[in-house]
Image (tube, rainbow, N blue to C red):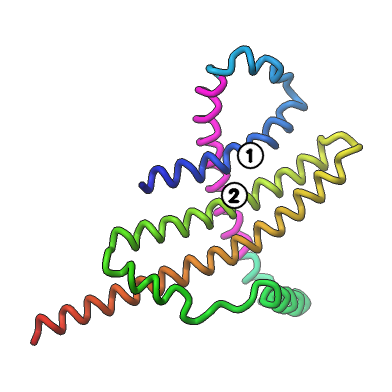
């Protein structure tokens, strides 16, 4: 189950990434894209494994960049008051747009799933998968914006660039929200499982 979920999410990221990768490579190497129909069976056999590997690279790179950005955020906050004020304003805007999380979010579903550890683990994997897809979409859209800026034809450059930029910002917001939701579910599920273990130990001790 975990492998199937990972396979799908890496393929999604890899297929999307292949668009801007081909756009970049095509400016340096003449790719025989017009012959795909003639060799479509071979193309499919080669393309999907390459897309899967590319998706893994996108996921690892996006995870690395997000961690480095978080570290940079902590460092700059300690050094710059102007950045701290600006960041506070952005956090308020984010709260206004995304809303504040409910304190009892996932309390009921976590309570139900805590009776079956495999079901709880599968649900956690599904939530983490959403995080990864959103994270990969953010990196892909950012790379797409840079690719459009550098290589897209003049008549469509602005449209593609701003479209990818909007998608990048939206994907970051979605990643933050989905990450928050999956973290809330994990905490709720772990609390329920731990409380059930304590109850079982108490019952055995009676």
Residue 202 vertical position relative to residue 46 in the rendered view, above or below: below
Determine contact: label 2, label 1, CB under 8 Å. yes
Label 2 or label 1, whichever comes before in sequence order? 1
Residue 94 vertical position relative to residue 47 in the rendered view, above or below: below
* Residue with the mark numbered 2: 136
> Is label 1 in a helix, a strand or a loop?
helix
Q: Quadrant of the C terminus?
A: bottom left
Q: Which corner quadrant of the image does residue 188 belong to?
A: bottom left
* Rendered location of residue 152, percent (x, y): 83, 36
* Rendered location of residue 46, percent (x, y): 53, 23
**Residue 140 disc label:** none
Q: Is residue 194 left or right of residue 19?
A: left
Q: Which corner quadrant of the image does residue 151 belong to?
A: top right
> Is label 2 in a helix, a strand or a loop?
helix
* Residue with the mark numbered 1: 17
Residue 181 vertical position relative to residue 204 in the rendered view, above or below: above
The part of the chain drawn in magenta is 43-70
Residue 65 is one of the magenta-drawn residues: yes
Assess disc 2: are there few (<14), some (14-19) or many (≥20) residues with their C-alpha within 10 Å of its C-alpha: many
Assess disc 1: are there few (<14), some (14-19) or many (≥20) residues with their C-alpha within 10 Å of its C-alpha: many
Going 69% across and 20% down the picture, which residue do you hit? Answer: 33
Q: Is residue 8 left or right of residue 172?
A: left
Task: Residue lying at the far right in this picture: please name it.
Answer: 155
Going 71% across and 79% down the picture, which residue do you hit? Answer: 92
């Amino acid at each position: 189950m975990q492998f199937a979920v990972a396979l799908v999410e890496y393929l999604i990221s890899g297929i999307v990434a292949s668009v801007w990768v081909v756009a970049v490579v095509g400016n340096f190497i003449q790719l025989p894209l017009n012959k795909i129909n003639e060799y479509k069976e071979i193309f499919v056999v080669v393309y999907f494994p390459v897309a899967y590997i590319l998706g893994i690279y996108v996921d690892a790179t996006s995870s690395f960049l997000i961690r480095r950005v978080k570290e940079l955020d902590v460092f700059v906050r300690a050094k710059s008051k102007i950045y701290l004020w600006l960041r506070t304003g952005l956090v308020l805007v984010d709260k206004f747009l995304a809303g504040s999380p409910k304190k009892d979010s996932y309390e009921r579903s976590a309570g139900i799933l805590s009776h079956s550890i495999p079901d709880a683990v599968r649900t956690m994997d599904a939530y983490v998968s959403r995080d990864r897809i959103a994270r990969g979409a953010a990196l892909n859209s950012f790379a797409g914006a840079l690719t459009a800026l550098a290589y897209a034809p003049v008549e469509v450059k602005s449209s593609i660039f701003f479209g990818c930029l909007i998608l990048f910002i939206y994907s970051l917001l979605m990643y933050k929200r989905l990450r928050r939701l999956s973290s809330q579910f994990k905490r709720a599920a772990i609390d329920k499982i731990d409380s059930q273990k304590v109850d079982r130990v108490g019952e055995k001790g009676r």
